[in-house]
Image (spheres, rainbow, N blue to C red):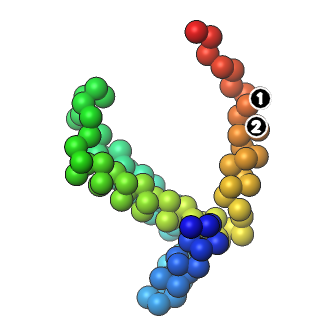
Amino acid sequence: MEYQDVLQILRQFTAERGWEKYHNLKDLALSANLEASEVLEIFQWKDEQTPLTTEETAHLKEEIADTLIYLFYMTDKLGMDPYEEIAKKMKINQGRHWKEEN
């Protein structure tokens, strides 16, 4: 599925429910942060060596999707291409961060 296909699904979902009025950048940012916190909650109190269960992995994927949905709503509001912005940011990061020496 391409980015524009995802946007179309998200726009239609929002329009069918009349949620456009709630989709301002501030509220979308808050919602993205809340969903990202739910990603983190899956790992709370877990030893980093313990693998996730099948159910936890499924839950993690759902919460990542929820987070991405709100971020995609934000990119749509801003009229930005997230892939282009990621590419730009990676160029900036390449100049900032050095590779670890082994």
Q: Quadrant of residue 45?
A: top left
Secondary element under disc 2, as helix, strand or loop, is helix
Label 2 crowd (10 A; few <14 / some 14-19 / many >=20): few
Q: Is residue 21 visible?
A: no
Rendered position, 39 above or below 81 = above
Q: Amino acid at mark 2?
A: Ile
Lateral position of residue 58 relative to residue 91, left or right = left
Disc 1: which residue: 95
Split into 4 quadrants, where in the image is the C terminus?
Answer: top right
Rendered position, 5 above or below 19 = above
Residue for point 43% across, 60% down: 65
Rendered position, 100 above or below 29 = above
Image coordinates of residue 95 in percent, x first then y, are 77, 29
Label 1 crowd (10 A; few <14 / some 14-19 / many >=20): few
Secondary element under disc 1, as helix, strand or loop, is helix
Lateral position of residue 91 relative to residue 9, left or right = right
Q: Is residue 84 visible?
A: yes
Q: Nearer the viewer, residue 73 or 59?
A: 59
Image coordinates of residue 46 in percent, x first then y, are 24, 34
Q: Quadrant of residue 74?
A: bottom right
- The tally of labels here is 2
Q: Nearer the viewer, residue 25 or 4?
A: 4
Label 2 vs label 1: CA separation? 5 Å
Residue for point 62% across, 11% down: 101
Q: Are marks 2 and 1 in contact (CB under 8 Å)?
A: yes
Q: Amino acid at mark 1?
A: Gly
Disc 2: which residue: 92
Residue for point 22% across, 43% down: 53
